[in-house]
């Protein structure tokens, strides 16, 4: 039997799907397992011992041609079963156009008509990692083995991280804290000034270096933090691949940032976490990991709204993030450092 999985689109969600993917071979006895994923998440599945093929796609750039091109990439592979982790109509359409025989996913986004089996979404809210395991259980009729997400790093990954650190004059031997300085969603941003003051305190009071991680879009925010005056703050934003930044995180003393793809990635390589939580919902998407984790979150009536833009005005605007103080985060940092 040939099986293909459509991986989630965001790095954090893809990390949360790893335990379900780890169960595929045992629960399905598939002879060939493929994962279809967007460019941002595809590297997560490289070198997985149970995955025979990783199909990288770009189905977002064009709403009509994108899914068709993605379908064309696997059309001749004659997959027997396709499991859909994303809840979208377009992800199911890809498998339909590709001629995947059995198409299974949650009954969301009006896509029942193009699924061969639509699984009813869980009646009660659950953590997203658990929802992927739940889907797999409904598909196979067997109970998956639950465990925390783990990303195994190859020698090449470790070397790539070492080279990235070396470009800014660091090595794995340096005691450094990894900081993701900017969230994609505006409502999740703590601000360069607060991160800068926090970084300055970590350097001066804890004698640790700061490595700023993220995409090229985060580099301006990282430079603003560097301007807080220390030669022990280093900007790696946009200078690493997904797997090389995972290697950098695996050697960090701590990760600090929002509930983000990098937070989940850090947890999956056993780096302790301090997560600043505001509009995200920890009950659904907080990193699940073996390492020590603290989630900083205020008790507000609007907390965990899951909005990328704050809808409130005046003093209430983005208060979930504004009320988190540098002192509060610094205290968490000192208690979670490995």
Image: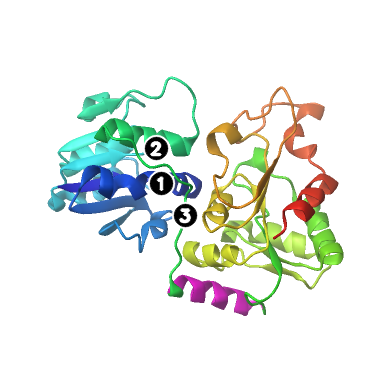
The secondary structure making up most of the magenta span is helix
Which residue is drawn at the image coordinates 51% and 67% (left, top)? 244
Q: Is residue 183 visible?
A: yes
Q: Is residue 58 visible?
A: no
Where residue 327 sits: x, y (%)? 85, 48
Q: Return the residue at label 3.
A: 150
Nearest the eye: 171 or 314: 171
* Outermost residue to the top: 123
Left/right placement of residue 10 relative to residue 102 reads right
Which of disc 2 and disc 3 is earlier in sequence? 2
Against 29, is 270 above or below? below
Which of disc 1 and disc 2 is earlier in sequence? 1
Where residue 260 sits: x, y (%)? 58, 47
Instruction: Give the alpha-carbon distance from disc 2 to disc 1, as whole Å.
Output: 8 Å
Instruction: Give the alpha-carbon distance from disc 3 to disc 2, as whole Å.
Output: 15 Å
Which residue is drawn at the image coordinates 59% and 62% (left, top)? 249
Magenta-tinted stretch: 156-168
Q: Return the residue at label 1.
A: 19
Rendered image quadrant of residue 107: top left
Against 237, is 275 above or below? above
Where residue 89 sits: x, y (%)? 32, 32
Rendered image quadrant of residue 237: bottom right
Nearest the eye: 121 or 237: 121
Where residue 293 sits: x, y (%)? 65, 47
Instruction: Give the alpha-carbon distance from disc 1 to disc 3, as whole Å.
Output: 8 Å
Q: Residues within 10 Å of mark 2 (few under 14, many from 20)?
A: many
Left/right placement of residue 229 relative to residue 119 reads right
- Residue 116: in magenta span: no
Q: Secondary structure at mark 2?
A: helix
Q: Which mark is residue 322?
A: none
Q: Which mark is residue 132?
A: 2
Mark 3 or mark 2, whichever is nearer to me: 3
């Amino acid at each position: 039997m040939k099986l293909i999985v459509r991986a989630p689109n965001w790095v954090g969600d893809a990390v949360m799907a790893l335990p379900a993917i780890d169960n595929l071979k045992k629960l399905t006895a598939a002879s060939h397992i493929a994962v279809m994923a967007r460019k941002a998440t595809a590297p997560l599945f490289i070198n997985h011992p149970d995955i025979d093929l990783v199909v990288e796609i770009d189905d977002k750039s064009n709403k009509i041609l994108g899914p068709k091109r993605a379908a064309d990439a696997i059309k001749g592979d004659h997959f027997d079963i396709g499991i859909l982790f994303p809840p979208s109509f377009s992800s199911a359409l890809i498998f339909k156009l590709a001629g995947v025989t059995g198409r299974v996913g949650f009954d969301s986004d009006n896509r029942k008509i193009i699924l061969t089996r639509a699984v009813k979404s869980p009646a009660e809210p659950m953590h997203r990692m658990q929802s992927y395991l739940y889907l797999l259980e409904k598909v196979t009729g067997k109970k998956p083995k639950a465990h925390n997400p783990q990303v195994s790093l190859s020698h090449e990954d470790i070397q790539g991280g070492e080279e990235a650190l070396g470009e800014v004059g660091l090595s794995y031997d340096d005691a450094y804290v990894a900081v993701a300085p900017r969230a994609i969603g505006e409502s999740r941003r703590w601000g360069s000034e607060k991160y800068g003051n926090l970084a300055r305190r970590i350097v001066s009071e804890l004698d640790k270096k700061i490595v700023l991680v993220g995409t090229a879009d985060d580099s301006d925010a990282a430079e603003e933090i560097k301007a807080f005056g220390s030669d022990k703050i280093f900007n790696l934003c946009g200078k690493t691949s997904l797997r090389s930044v995972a290697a950098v995180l695996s050697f960090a003393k701590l990760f600090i940032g929002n509930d983000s793809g990098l937070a989940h990635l850090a947890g999956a390589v056993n780096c302790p976490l301090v997560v600043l939580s505001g509009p995200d919902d920890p009950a659904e998407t907080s990193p699940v990991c073996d390492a020590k984790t603290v989630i900083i979150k205020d008790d507000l009536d609007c907390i965990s709204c899951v909005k990328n833009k704050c809808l409130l005005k005046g003093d209430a605007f983005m208060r979930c993030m504004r009320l988190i103080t540098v002192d509060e985060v610094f205290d968490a940092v000192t208690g979670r450092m490995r």
